[in-house]
Structures are given as C-alpha cells and as structure tokens.
Image (spheres, grey):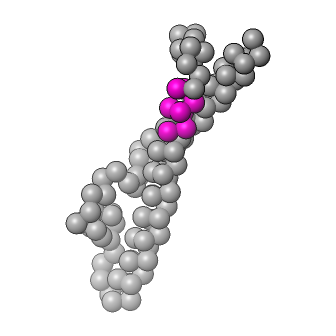
C-alpha cells in the first residue's frame, strides 16, 4: 500500500485522471446494465402479450449487437461496482496528495 501511495504522490494529476476514467467506465457499465434491463423487460412485456416465451439475455434480444460488455449477472455487476469504488478511492487519494503537495 505504501508503494501505491508513493506512486500517487509522485504524479497526483495522472492518478486523478486515471481515477476519474476508471470511475466513468464503471458508471457507464452500471447505467448500460440498467437501461439494458429496462429494454429487456419492455421486450418481454410485448412478447407476453403475443404469448411468446420470454427472452433471458440481451444476446437473445439483440443478436446483431455486441452485448458481451454489458453486465447482466452478479459477476458483471460486481466488476462494475469494483471499478466505481476503485475509481472513487483513487480520485480521493490523488486529491489528498495534490492538497499535501500544494500546501508543502
């Protein structure tokens, strides 16, 4: 952990950019999953009216699009949540490091 903090202290601006980028990627994944789930529920409501079996995954609903990046299960949501948490922690640590270097 000490190595990590010293690395951030050497380059707080780069760590801040990296932290915000990682946070943004995680947040985009979470939002994509929420919108994908809403879309899938809407499609299944229409399919229920037509007495068709429900679709379980985005791959079944949208076979022409690359949906492998959108988290659909617990593992995918866990990865997205970890990205958000790591990005937040890195941004906070970089902010503290830049305040300390600015005060010194």
Please say if 23 is above or below 11: below
Query: Hey, which residue is sitting farthest right in the picture?
Result: 103
**Horizontally, is 90 left or right of 49 in the view?**
right
Query: Residue 88 or 68: which is nearer the viewer?
Result: 88
**Per the image, is 16 magenta?**
yes
Q: Count numbered badges in the picture.
A: 0
Identified at 60% across, 36% down, the residue is 88
**The C terminus lies in quadrant:** top right
Where is residue 68? Give x, y as percent: 30, 53
Residue 66 seen in render:
yes
Identified at 49% across, 38% down, the residue is 22
Where is residue 50? Give x, y as percent: 33, 89
Look at the image and give the residue range highlighted in magenta: 14-21
Identified at 45% across, 51% down, the residue is 29
**The N terminus lies in quadrant:** top right
Where is residue 33? Give x, y as percent: 45, 58
Query: Hey, which residue is sitting farthest bottom in the picture?
Result: 50
Where is residue 2? Give x, y as percent: 58, 10
Please say if 98 is above or below 69: above
Identified at 52% across, 26% down, the residue is 14
**Per the image, is 72 magenta?**
no
Please say if 2 is above or below 34: above
**Horizontally, is 84 left or right of 53 in the view?**
right
Magenta: main secondary structure equals: helix
Query: Residue 7 or 104: which is nearer the viewer?
Result: 104
Query: Residue 3 or 18: which is nearer the viewer?
Result: 18
């Amino acid at each position: 952990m000490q190595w990590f903090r010293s690395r951030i202290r050497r380059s707080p601006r780069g760590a801040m950019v990296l932290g915000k980028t990682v946070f943004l990627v995680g947040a985009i994944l979470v939002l994509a999953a929420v919108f994908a789930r809403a879309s899938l529920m809407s499609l299944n409501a229409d399919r229920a009216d037509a007495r068709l079996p429900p679709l379980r995954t985005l791959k079944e609903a949208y076979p022409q699009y690359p949906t492998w990046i959108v988290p659909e299960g617990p593992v995918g949501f866990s990865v997205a949540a970890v990205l958000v948490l790591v990005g937040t922690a890195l941004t906070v640590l970089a902010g503290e490091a830049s305040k300390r270097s600015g005060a010194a």
